[in-house]
Image (cartoon, rainbow, N blue to C red):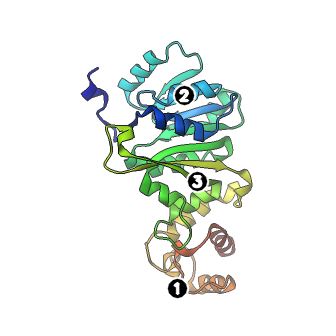
Amino acid sequence: MSMVKRHRPKLGQHFLSDPRYCSRVTDALGLNTDDLVIEIGPGHGAVTGLLASRAQRVVAIEIDPELVDELGQKFRQSPNVEIVPGDVLYTDLGEICRRHNVERCCVFGNLPYYITSPIIHHVLGFAARVRVIGLLVQREVAERLVANPGSRDYGYLTVITRMYSSARMILEIPPGAFAPPPKVHSAFVRFDMDARKRSISPENEQEFLSFLKQSFAFKRKKLLNCLAPISSRQRIEAELERLALPLSVRAEQLSLEQFIAIFLNLR
């Protein structure tokens, strides 16, 4: 395979290739020797081998058939590495855990920029089966994931991240660490999952997520107006007043706890 073909980002991918950064992100994941790691988009396997050296087993999900073949050859003598062809958005991570008889797994991924949010949303949907997540994402997305209420970067993705985990931006990664190099800086974000953060019961979870999406439906618009399709103005005003929030408050100014309180009282 030629170098041009090998490094062409057919699916919007920029593969982490610098050995120093590969080691640093693997170390930052904090793996145990008995861990099952699900890797999203292993690419050419630069991190896969490092994960396999630290964990009990790695299940690497790759959508590109050419890379699946390449990875199969590369890890054919690695009994604790399983290459799974497929799209992670249609992959049941819980089923992988059950198949390997583990309660919770670890997830690592170097995510294509154009589909970062859907993948994060999908993985968080399996929060009960995940111990820790480590993702390489565009720096701009990393800032959104760890933003505080009232900041420019705070939004729907921030709130659902806080709903399931404590997220930290561990390190910034320059374009030159990838092949081919992207035009922007990337960052490694670690999500420590905590079941105790689940303040919404499982039966209300999807309804709450829909409520959050509606709350952030119109950027910089008052929450009162965003929620108009799902509740009366009188009820919304009464709830905001109960929480000592101004009627002009916007979704990007509210904490997760405030969203939960409003949701539960408007149901």
* Residue 120: x %, y % from top left: 51, 49
Q: Does the residue at mark 1 contact the one at mark 3 (Cβ under 8 Å)?
A: no
Vertical position of residue 28 compared to residue 50: above or below: below
* Residue 38: x %, y % from top left: 57, 33
- Dot 3: element: strand
- Dot 1: element: loop
Please name the residue shown 56% across and 87% down the image. 247
The amino acid type found where label 1 is placed reads Ser
**First reached walking from the N terminus: tag 3 or tag 2:** 2
Horizontal side of 38 relative to 244 (left or right) equals: left
Q: Can residue 79 be seen at all in this image of the molecule?
A: yes
Please name the residue shown 47% across and 35% down the image. 20
**First reached walking from the N terminus: tag 1 or tag 3:** 3
Q: Does the residue at mark 1 contact the one at mark 2 (Cβ under 8 Å)?
A: no
- Residue linked to disc 3: 168
The amino acid type found where label 2 is placed reads Leu
| Label drawn at residue 50 | 2
- Residue linked to disc 1: 248
Few, some or many residues within 10 Å of mark 2 (<14, 14–19, 20+) = some
Vertical position of residue 185 compared to residue 246: above or below: above
Most distant residue in the right direction: 196
